[in-house]
Amino acid sequence: MSVTGRYREGFWREAPEEPGAVFRDAEPALTVARHLALFAPHLSDPGLPLVDLGCGNGTRTRFLADRFPRVPGADLSAAALDRARRADPAGRAAYRHLDAAEKSATRALHGEIGDANVHVRGVLHQCEADDRQPLVDGITTLVGEHGRAFLVEPSRAAGAVLKGLAAGPAAKLAPVLRHGIAPGGVDDAVVPEFPTAAGLTVTAGGTLPLTTTEHGPDGVRIVLPSVWYVAGRAA
């Protein structure tokens, strides 16, 4: 397991299981529903499997599973996947361990499910720098010829927002910082360079508020700035 994997494993082992207790685990209506509204118009084939990469405890995976015919949630953390399965006793989605930076792992998954659309929220900034391009190369393998990837990353400005809150009462933020997975580690302009280097064409992008479960000293929900991009094979 990589350094990145150890950070994620420790975070999910320690995190409380109550709904809304994890900093980034806001209600799907405030997060993935907004992402889907941007992503869906760019899908060349909505019937393809939709891989929720970096699925964590599966909150957004279950939302997506109600809207697409096949939704595998994939994560590097066994502790996160255990939580996802416990929270989904009806089996609305499937969950599997996946290190997307490993070529053999993404090739095996692509061989199993074929081309897929891929939803990726906030995974790049959690990676070690040397893992970022291999991760996007793995996403490219999953996308194949007909899928699309949707990448969402907290912007560099998000790091400044969190630094201003770190000394305050934002208790849910403390575990994120302690495990070294705080946003702001990837420059905004660099994010689209990863899919381009992997052979994908970036077809759309923009900025988007990223809602968290935490509140600032004024009682207002903390919302981080983020950037998003859609990428796929050129037509």
Image (spheres, helix red, strand yellow):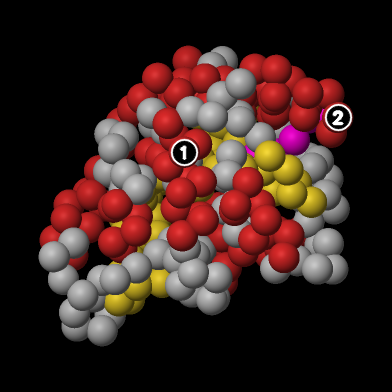
Mark found first going from the N terminus, 1 or 2? 1
Depth check, front residue: 79 or 47: 79
Kindly report which numbered mark, 1 or 2, lies closer to the viewer in this rendering: 1
Amino acid type at circle 2 is Glu
- Looking at the image, do the residues carrying marks 1 and 2 touch, with CB atoms under 8 Å apart? no
Callout 1: SS? helix
Callout 2: SS? helix
Q: Residue at the location (60% across, 52% down)?
A: 79
**Region rendered in magenta:** 114-119
What is the C-alpha distance between the residues marked 1 and 2? 27 Å
Residue 54 sits above or below residue 60 on the image: above
Q: Residue at the location (51% across, 56% down)?
A: 13
Relative to residue 50, is residue 225 drawn left or right?
left
Q: Residue at the location (83% across, 24% down)?
A: 111
Depth check, front residue: 150 or 96: 96
- Residue ID for mark 2: 112
Can residue 160 be seen by looking at this rendering? yes
Counting from the top left corner in percent of width and height, residue 150 is at 56, 41
Counting from the top left corner in percent of width and height, residue 34 is at 53, 62
Counting from the top left corner in percent of width and height, residue 200 is at 57, 21
In the rendered view of the protein, which quadrant contains the C terminus?
top right
Q: Residue at the location (29% across, 71% down)?
A: 171
Residue 125 lies within the magenta run: no
Q: Quadrant of residue 82?
A: bottom right
Give neighbour class at mark 1: few <14, some 14-19, many 20+ (Cα, 10 Å): few
**Numbered tag placed on residue 6 in the rendering:** 1
Residue 117 lies within the magenta run: yes
Say how many tags the image has.
Answer: 2
